[in-house]
Amino acid sequence: EVQLVESGGGFVHPGGSFRLSCAASGFTFGTYEMHWVRQAPGKGLEWISYISSTGGTKYYADSVKGRFTISRDNAKNSLFLQMDSLGVEDTAFYYCARDPGAAIFDFWGQGALVTVSS
Amino acid sequence: EIMMTQSPATLSVSPGGRATLSCRASQFVSNNLAWYQQKPGQPPRLLIYGASTRATDIPARFSGSGSGTDFTLTISSLQSEDFAIYYCQQYNVWPPLTFGGGTKVEIE
């Protein structure tokens, strides 16, 4: 069974940093492209980052470019999102999502809530 | 960036009724369009990709159509578990990947 489990959600002050992790199981993680998608409470979905299966290619939404860094450790079946210079507008549920190769999301984690507040 | 516009924002339908949801792209996206369903407290679930191909284990009452800039998701006979928010997403030109604002399907 495919499973994606995010961890690391919590509370952070504006200007702070946070690191999210996503543990993958039930599939050959190293052969899949992965994404992070976020959703502010009560709002719609926003794609924020992509990483290729090898980690050699990364893309970011303009809203997070220069502040967020996506990475992966295929040996540990894990995806990461390092978030720096956080603002209140970054408060959201953060989902890791698997991409079967077409820039769609066929499996999603349950989401990790990151709250940025003073 | 390709903007995706969904209508209506809210759709009231009786159980057993038919729901027709629309999604329009600001530019040509060919058939590179996906639909997702999201229930409260849950992550989204992939329903349709390639504009009309149902994802694994998605019931046949869900169907997608359209190409170019205009797309439709139809739920032919709404079951209680189908009341949710539905999002479209284009993947023809990216980054960024972009979603519509969502259509909430509620019980009439």
Image (cartoon, coloured by chain):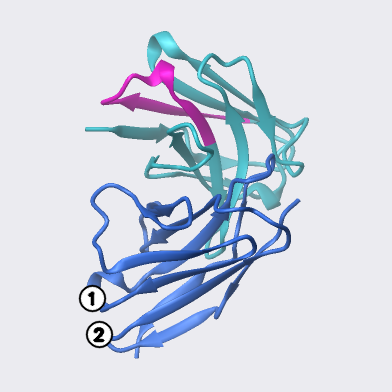
Chain colours: A cyan, B blue
Q: Which residue is painted at 39% across and 61% down in the image? A: B37
Q: Which residue is painted at 70% across and 60% down in the image? A: B3
**Does any portion of residue B20 appear in the rendered image?**
yes
Task: Specify whether residue B27 is painted magenta.
Answer: no
**Does any portion of residue A118 appear in the rendered image?**
no
The chain under label 2 reads: B
For the residue pair B6 and A10, the one nearer the viewer reads as B6
Q: Which residues are magenta?
A: A18-35
Decide: is A105 above or below B61: above
For the residue pair B106 and B88, the one nearer the viewer reads as B88
Neighbours of disc 2 within 10 Å: few (<14), some (14-19), many (20+): some
Question: Residue B90, image x and y in percent?
Answer: 59, 52
Decide: is A74 above or below B55: above
Image quadrant of residue A62? Answer: top right
Q: Amino acid at mark 1?
A: Ser
Tag 1, which secondary structure?
Answer: helix
Neighbours of disc 1 within 10 Å: few (<14), some (14-19), many (20+): few
Task: Specify whether residue A19 is painted magenta.
Answer: yes
Separation of residues labelled 1 and 2 (CA atoms)? 7 Å
The answer to whether mark 1 and mark 2 are in CB contact below 8 A is: yes
Q: Residue furthest top?
A: A75
Question: Residue B100, image x and y in percent?
Answer: 59, 62
Question: Residue B83, image x and y in percent?
Answer: 33, 74
> From the viewer's perspective, is A27 left or right of B10?
left
To which residue does mark 1 refer? B80
Q: Which residue is painted at 69% across and 56% down in the image? A: B28
> From the viewer's perspective, is B56 left or right of A117?
left
Q: Amino acid at mark 2?
A: Pro
Question: Which disc is residue B15 wearing?
Answer: 2
Q: Which residue is painted at 62% across and 35% down in the image? A: A49
